Amino acid sequence: MQSNKKIEDVFYYLRDEEGVIKESRSIKPKNTKRGLKASLFDRIIYNPKLDLEEDEIAYALLHEEGHKETKQNTPLYFAVVCVLAFLFGVPFVLSAFMGMDIPSIGPSWTNMIIFFVIVVVFTRAYSDRFHEDELKADVYACKRLKKVERFSRPPEEVMAGLLERGGDLGGFP
């Protein structure tokens, strides 16, 4: 995978020289539709085709660091959805695809409908928490970027510039 030197230079500068990114973090190029994302492990994944200014890269990297360092609600949401999928999905899979009859659990299609309704309702109810997670990451990025003298634009201006682009981080199709 081809890397993007500018992104990696900013990452290593923020991590090694400024100390605003945790020392154990690494960065890895990967062709994704999203520009940058924090993985479940201590890694930030980026699209090497990402074309941003240095201060925008710094803000985006610190935003992803913010997801890792602030208390996030999203993992709890996915844990609940996985439990629901197991409770409602296993009977469906066993009966529909393996031909096993599980009369005590009820009709499999009913279970799947209930599962999807619960997930949709839960997602709608939880959407404020997702927005809260994004806001926490933005605040984290702004506070940390203000401490870095190398980038002259105020963090709020950098964030506004990214939002003007539609938040697409570089105009991906």
Image (spheres, rainbow, N blue to C red):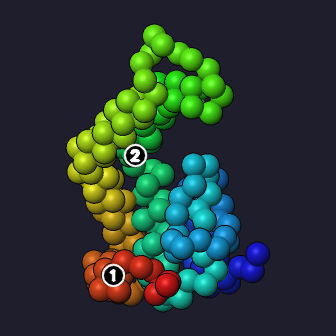
Q: How far apart are the two marked residues, 2 and 1, measured between alpha carbons?
A: 23 Å
Q: Is residue 88 visible?
A: no
Q: Residue at x 48, y 13 (%)?
A: 103
Question: Is disc 2 placed on a helix, strand or loop?
Answer: helix
Q: Residue at x 61, y 49 (%)?
A: 41
Q: Residue at x 51, y 71 (%)?
A: 34
From the viewer's perspective, is 74 left or right of 46?
left
Outermost residue toward the right?
A: 1
Q: Quadrant of residue 88?
A: top left
Near-viewer residue (97 or 73) = 97
Quadrant of the image containing the N terminus: bottom right
Q: Position of residue 110 (x, y in %)?
A: 38, 30
Identify residue type, mark 1. Gly
Q: Quadrant of residue 162?
A: bottom left
Binning the other alpha carbons within 10 Å of mark 1 as few (below 14), some (14 to 19) or many (20 upward) gives: few
Residue identified by numbered label 2: 74
Identify residue type, mark 2. Thr
Q: Residue at x 64, y 80 (%)?
A: 48
Q: Position of residue 136 (x, y in %)?
A: 31, 56
Q: Is residue 138 above or below residue 159?
A: above
Q: Position of residue 92 (x, y in %)?
A: 51, 29
Q: Is residue 51 above or below residue 38?
A: below
Q: Is residue 53 visible?
A: yes
Near-viewer residue (14 or 61) = 61
Residue identified by numbered label 1: 166
